[in-house]
Amino acid sequence: MDEIIQIIVVFISQMLLIFFKHVGIRVIVKEQIIKSMFITFLIQSSWLVSSAIGISAFMKGNYIVVTFYLIAGVVGTYLNFKIKV
């Protein structure tokens, strides 16, 4: 996969992972079972994609992709505080 595409995919999927994890906590606390199941699916999907690309990049020494992986987690947390779901 082209490095630019990897960066874009890992950034979006990692950002969504962190965002969905926080949303998932809110949904679970409200005991909304169906929403919780859907959010869990989104968490697992985004985790699978971001981890596969991030770990592969780390093992190959592609620290540019790894850096975007880490930054995306921070952005996901920031967005969670700004976007109330």
Image (spheres, grey):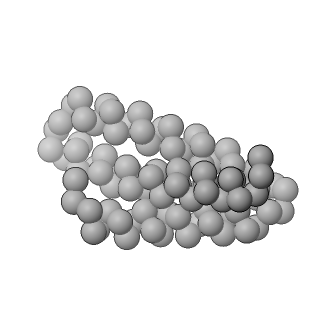
Percent of width and height locating residue 66: 69, 63
Left or right placement of residue 31 versus residue 78 in this view = left
Give the quarter of the image for residue 36: top left
Compared across the picture, whether 36 is left or right of 44 comes to left
Outermost residue toward the right? Answer: 60
Residue projecting furthest to the left: 30
**Residue 15 drawn at (x, y percent):** 48, 58
- x%, y% of residue 18? 43, 56
Q: Residue at x 63, y 48 (%)?
A: 51
Q: Quadrant of residue 19?
A: bottom left
Which residue appears at 34% of the width and 39% of the height?
39
Q: Residue at x 51, y 44 (%)?
A: 46
Which of 56/79 is in front?
79
Residue 11 on image: x %, y %: 57, 59
Residues 5 and 32: in front is 5
In the rendered picture of this protein, how many numbered marks are placed on residues?
Answer: 0
> In the image, is residue 2 above or below residue 74?
above
**Residue at x-position 15% and y-position 44%:** 30
